[in-house]
Image (cartoon, rainbow, N blue to C red):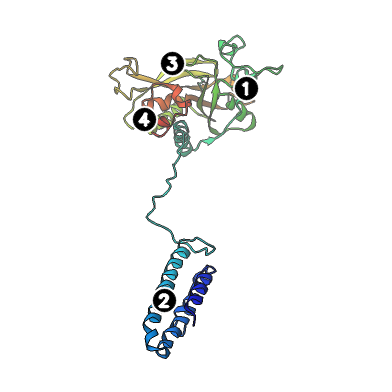
Amino acid sequence: MDIDAIKTQVDFEIGSVDSVRSLEAFRLKFLGRKGIIAQLTSSIPNLHPQERGAFGQEVNALKNKVSSLITEKQRSIASGSGESRQRTYDIGMPGIAQELGSLHPLTQVLNEICGIFKKMGFAVVEGPEIESEYNNFTGLNIPLEHPSRDVFDTFYLKGKERLLLRSHTSPVQIRVMKKQKPPLAVIVPGRVYRPDAVDASHSFMFHQIEGFMVDRNITFADLKGILEVFAKAVFGEDIKMRFRPHFFPFTEPSAEVDISCIICKGRGCSVCGKKGWLEILGSGMIHPNVFKHVGYDPKKYTGFAFGMGVERIAMLKYGINDIRIFFENDLRFLKQF
Ligand code: PHE
């Protein structure tokens, strides 16, 4: 047999080997027990004794060549080159880490507060950010000459209908009470808008949570009890609360609610302005005129309402001293929650 012709054949055939299966066929053909190289080896004794040595060396060289071609092919098939579609994976390679997002701190505080009231049986209701003047003011017993109706305190929309961006979440009281009869226990989270100059404690958009409860025989004591559960759940069991007389057109009597300063525990510091108390919300018993606007009989029903600023609660809870940071979307801030 012509060894050079066999070498050419080897080089030609290895080129079309592209899978584990065709490689095995190639191996059997040349290196198998009855393969071409075995045939060459068994033909040696038939040769002239002087030719045997040189021929034997050539057969050996051919055998080594075929072996190394096979090893090479095995590697290239395993690493997935060619058309083999066989792959191995390097499980020691570093992975591609997926960054985890989280809820905005305001969303977290809002969810926490709504969760507390839900446990006490309140239903969560939302209302539109574009409101009628009636729902935002008139229905809430806010007189025409009240300063909050001024264009400097409310964003009015262009057009004849006197639509506006709600300046508080209280208009949702009107919406809910017009649709439903007592008993009612409702919590309303949402955005509100006021044309304030932006500074560390003012933003033209912020979030409020409104709450109200209406039924026969709802009293101020119910308001106090519910708010105490809320304040202790958010700020801790040893917080103290006080109700300070105040005025709102839509509640009578009205009160602002303070908690003992969570920084100095009431001793007086820069956060509470040396007062030892922090204002957290406005509240009161729903005014009979509001009930008249929604068609409830004020002799039959009583109710309380309260409203709080979510940013303010979050700032107190986390010791944040500038409201603007909530809206800057700076990841260095957001990643801390
Ligand atoms: N709407 C009031 C405000 O924005 C808060 C409030 C709500 C007060 C309900 C009393 C009752 O300031």
Residue lying at the far front of the rendered structure? 50
23 vs 332, nearest the viewer: 23
Q: CA distance from mark 4 to mark 2?
A: 83 Å
Residue 21 visible, this orientation = no
Q: Is mark 4 within 8 Å of ligand 1?
A: no
Closer to the observer: label 2 or label 3?
2
Q: CA distance from mark 3 to mark 1?
A: 25 Å
Specify the amino acid type for callout 2: Lys
Q: Earlier in the sequence, mark 2 or mark 1?
A: 2
Q: Earlier in the sequence, mark 3 or mark 4?
A: 4
Residue that label 4 marks = 235
Local packing at callout 4 (Cα closer than 10 Å; few below 14, some 14-19, many 20+) is some
Specify the amino acid type for callout 4: Phe
Residue lying at the far bottom of the rendered structure? 46
Q: Residue 18: percent from the left, percent from the top?
A: 52, 67
Residue that label 2 marks = 63
Local packing at callout 2 (Cα closer than 10 Å; few below 14, some 14-19, many 20+) is some
Residue lying at the far right of the rendered structure? 160
Residue that label 1 marks = 135
Residue 115 visible, this orientation = yes
Is the C-beta separation of discs 4 and 1 under 8 Å?
no
Q: Is mark 1 within 8 Å of ligand 1?
A: no
Q: CA distance from mark 2 to mark 3?
A: 103 Å
Residue that label 3 marks = 245
Closer to the observer: label 3 or label 1?
1
Q: Earlier in the sequence, mark 2 or mark 3?
A: 2
